[in-house]
Each structure stands twice: as C-alpha cells, then as structure tokens.
Image (cartoon, rainbow, N blue to C red):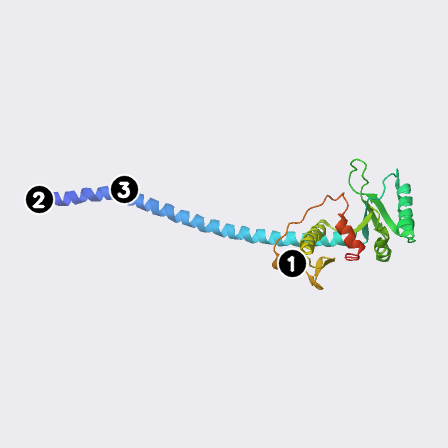
Amino acid sequence: MAATNEAILERLKKLDLLDPMNEKINDISNSLGEMNKEIKENKQNISALKTQVMEYKKENDTLLSKIQFFEQHSKRKNIIIYNIEEKETGWRELRLLLDGFFRELLKIEIDMNLIEGIYRIGKRYGTSPRPLRVVFADMNTKNEVISSTRNLRGTKISISQDYTEPEREKRRTLLSYRRKLMDSGIPVKIKGFSLLVNGKLSTLAELEEQYGNIESKKRNRETPPKKEEKKKREDGSSTAA
C-alpha cells in the first residue's frame, strides 16, 4: 500500500511539473494564432495596396497619354529651322530674317500674318546659331514650307518637324535601324514613324522582332540633324512625316 501511495505522489509531482509547460505551450499557440492573423491581415493589406498602385498606374498612363496628345496637337503646326544665322537683337529683326529666308532660300511667298510665333530654342554656346522654332497659324502654310525644303540643298540650313520627346526617340531609333540596313545594302526610307524596307512599311515593333534591339544615338536638342537625316528629308523620304 505504501508503494502505491508513493507511485501516486510521484505522478502528481510530474503533473505539477507539466502544468507550467502546458501554460507555455498554450501561450505559444496563442501567439502563433495572433501572428497568423496578422500575416493574413498584412496579406490583405498588401493585396489592397497592389490594387491601388495598379489603379494609380492606369490613371498615370491615361494622364500621360493625354499630355502627349495635347503636346503633339500643340506642335503639329510647328517647324524647327537649324543653322539659320543668329544676329537679330529683337523680335522685329527675327521676323525680317524669317521673311527673307522664305523668299530667298525657299523661293516661296509666305504671308507673315500667318506666323503665330518665332523664337530661338535653348541657350547659345559659342558662335553656333540656336534652332529657330516657327509656329504657323494653319497646316497649309506649314506644309508649303516643308514641301519647299528641297531648295535648301547645298546649304547648311535644315528643317524638321517639331516632334515631342517620345517622337524624337522613335525617330532616332528608326534612323539607327536605317543605318544598319543601309550598311547591309538594303534600300530603306523613313515614312513617319515607320520604315519602308524593300517597299514594305515596318513599325518599330516589327523591326525589333525581325532585326533585334538597337540603340539609338540621342542628339542634343539644340544641334541640327546629321547630314544623312538632312539628305533623307531632301530626298523626300520624311516630308510631312
């Protein structure tokens, strides 16, 4: 009987030792439950934030598209003239310079009342003239000037469209593809924002798929196009692009 009582007491002692351990286990279990709950809530919050970020991105893309559209719209009646002398001291002299440029070099008569704006672009460095932006009142007058650029052959002066920065980047990339293909003996012309390769128009995406990625050489906005781009315009490959 004494042995039985001792065994019972021994078991009770062990149970007493297990109680604190059970409490700790319960505490750990409760903590894990709280952590799992927090993790679940965090996942929900992250998912909501991702959705919000996507919505902001869509809104940003929409706004960017609108800005680019309005910028393109505002520039559609503009041209940029490179390497035209810069010695004017005021707007009146600049107007006379442009009028003389139309008459003497382009060999056309332009009503100066159809010119809404004339101004130089950027800061002047050294003796090189800054580009001249001309804003026309209508597209017909602008197109008449563009179609007369063939008369600039043999001069340092060149004319380009007033492209937006994304448009200029596309044109630079097209020029890079054009150089690459011409070096391979393939006849190429730039038409707007596509490339005419062997009589077939190809977009940038199609060119990239067929010929791989190609780096465009970024030109300073205040420097004129290179001779090959100027010659390309004179040959009629980019007129009214």
Q: From the viewer's perspective, is the residue at label 2 or at label 1 nearer?
A: 1
Which sits in the foreground, 135 or 59?
A: 135
In this rendering, would 177 be left or right of 26? right
- Judge by depth and name the residue closer to the eye, 236 or 75: 236
Between 10 and 136, the one lying in front of the other is 136
Q: Residue at x 7, y 46 (%)?
A: 1
> x, y (%) of residue 139?
84, 57
Q: Which residue is mark 3?
A: 20
Per the image, the residue denoted by label 1 is 207
Tally the numbered discs. Answer: 3
Callout 1: 10 Å neighbours few (<14), some, many (20+)?
A: some
Q: Amino acid at mark 2?
A: Ala
Image coordinates of residue 26 in percent, x first then y, are 32, 46
Cα distance between the residues tagged 2 and 1? 95 Å
- Indicate which disc residue 3 carries: 2
Tell me how far mark 2 sits from mark 3, CA to CA: 27 Å
Tell me the amino acid under the disc marked 3: Pro
List the single residue furthest toward the front.
185
| Quarter of the image with the C terminus in it | bottom right
In this view, 228 is above or below 206: above
Looking at this view, is 148 or 66 the one in front?
A: 148
Task: Say which label, 3 or 1, has the lower sequence index.
Answer: 3
Disc on res. 84: none
SS at mark 1 in the image: helix
* For residue 226, side relative to residue 118 (left or right): left
Question: Disc 2, disc 3: CB below 8 Å?
Answer: no
On the picture, is 236 further left or further right than 167? right
**Residue 112, can we see it?**
no
Q: Amino acid at mark 1?
A: Leu
The crowding category of the residue bearing disc 2, from other C-alpha atoms within 10 Å (few below 14, some 14 to 19, many at least 20), is few
Where does the image place residue 110, in percent across and percent down from the top left?
91, 53
